[in-house]
Image (cartoon, helix red, strand yellow):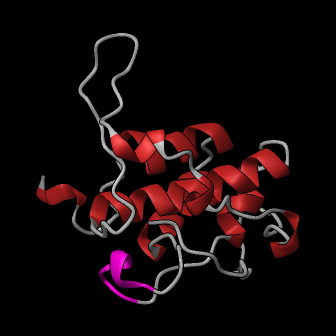
Amino acid sequence: MLRFLPLLAVSACECGHTPADPGDYALPDLADLPEDLTAEPLVSNDGGLPVRFEAGRADAVTAWADCAAILTACLEARGGAFDACVGGVPTCTTAEPWTEDSACCPSACVGGYQAARDAGGSEFDAFIDTFAIAPDCMPGLEEG
């Protein structure tokens, strides 16, 4: 479940980027989803597995989706400013992000992105590698 929060700036990595301004974007309200998205499973046009939206579900997958949602909202609002968005994302305060009161990204994910940037990786590559291809920085995802 996506939760709302004011986004707090965190310190930037040594790659010289500036954290995002928290006032630049807001998350959508999932309560505004059409009822047909929650009543029946969704099936993709290319024959993928059916998916059902569960508003009350809270686990590693939903926490990862929350992290991705706040980063995506920032990227859309800031024209793809990966460094600023990752540098400004709120970090989780527990080892179980799905128990947090607000959407967040684990500090291990932010640190992994920053390490990839500090090592010379592009913003895009560091982002995709950390948050999409191998999001093992999210506790619970590695457990299957």
At x 40%, y 47%, the residue is: 38
Looking at the rendered structure, the number of numbered marks drawn on it comes to: 0
Would residue 38 appear left or right of 22 to someone viewing this image? left
Is residue 76 or residue 42 the one in the foreground?
A: 42
Would residue 102 appear left or right of 54 to someone viewing this image? right
Would residue 138 appear left or right of 118 to someone viewing this image? left
Q: Is residue 45 visible?
A: yes
The magenta stretch spans residue 96 = yes
Q: Is residue 118 visible?
A: no
At x 30%, y 35%, the residue is: 41
Is residue 129 or residue 60 the one in the foreground?
A: 60
Q: Position of residue 8 (x, y in %)?
A: 72, 82
At x 61%, y 77%, the residue is: 90
Hey, which residue is sitting farthest top in the picture?
46
Q: Position of residue 16 (x, y in %)?
A: 80, 63
Would residue 114 appear left or right of 44 to someone viewing this image? right
Q: Position of residue 91 (x, y in %)?
A: 54, 79
On screen, 127 above or below 26? above
At x 68%, y 62%, the residue is: 27
In the rendered image, the quadrant that contains the N terminus is bottom left
The magenta stretch spans residue 57 = no
The magenta segment: 94-100
Q: Position of residue 135 (x, y in %)?
A: 36, 52
Occupied quadrant, residue 55: bottom left
